[in-house]
Image (spheres, rainbow, N blue to C red):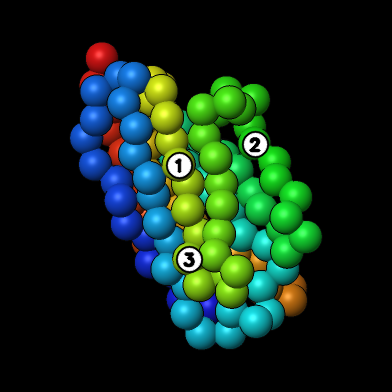
Amino acid sequence: QVHLVESGGGLVQAGGSLRLSCAASGSINRINFMGWYRQGPGKQRESVATLTNGGNTQYRDSVKGRFTIARDNAWKTLYLQMDNLKPEDTAVYYCYSWAMGDEYWGQGTQVTVSS
């Protein structure tokens, strides 16, 4: 089991920045990769960024150059640095982990970007 808790969401003006954190506990030694998803109002959940054990990253096109995913060495904390935020980034952001065939989700943190 991997337990995930997100923090760092909030209200920010367009052009501002936020850093989300995801604290992982439990069987973190089994984690293969982690990432961030988001779900905006009336929208489906979508992948934002992923990070593998090998350090490979993937970003959705709309956040490339603005968001950066990173982690500490032991998978204890996953981060998402979000710069130059736009109103369309408004969503609940979820932390996600894939560990040896099992997937785990956090409870989500709200990010609201005002214009």
Q: Residue 45: x percent and y percent?
A: 52, 42
Image position of 114 with respect to 8: above or below: above
| SS at circle 2 | strand
**Residue annotated with mark 1:** 81
Marks 1 and 3: in contact by CB < 8 Å? no
Q: Percent from the top left, x then y, of residue 91? A: 37, 36
Q: Which residue is mark 3?
A: 77
Dots 2 and 1: beta carbons under 8 Å? no
Task: Give how far apart the Cα atoms at labels 2 and 1 are.
Answer: 12 Å
At label 2, which amino acid type do we have? Answer: Tyr
Task: Name the quadrant of the C terminus.
Answer: top left
Residue at the front extreme, as displayed: 73
Residue pictured at 68% horizontal, 62% vertical: 33
Residue at image x 66%, y 53%? 51
Query: At label 3, which amino acid type do we have?
Result: Thr
Q: Which residue is mark 2?
A: 59
> Which residue is rendered at x = 34% and y = 39% of the image?
18
x and y, in percent, of residue 11 in the image = 22, 35
Badge 3 or badge 2: first in the primary sequence: 2
Image coordinates for residue 43, horizontal then vertical, percent: 46, 32
**Label 1, residues with CA under 10 Å away: few <14, some 14-19, many ≥20:** some
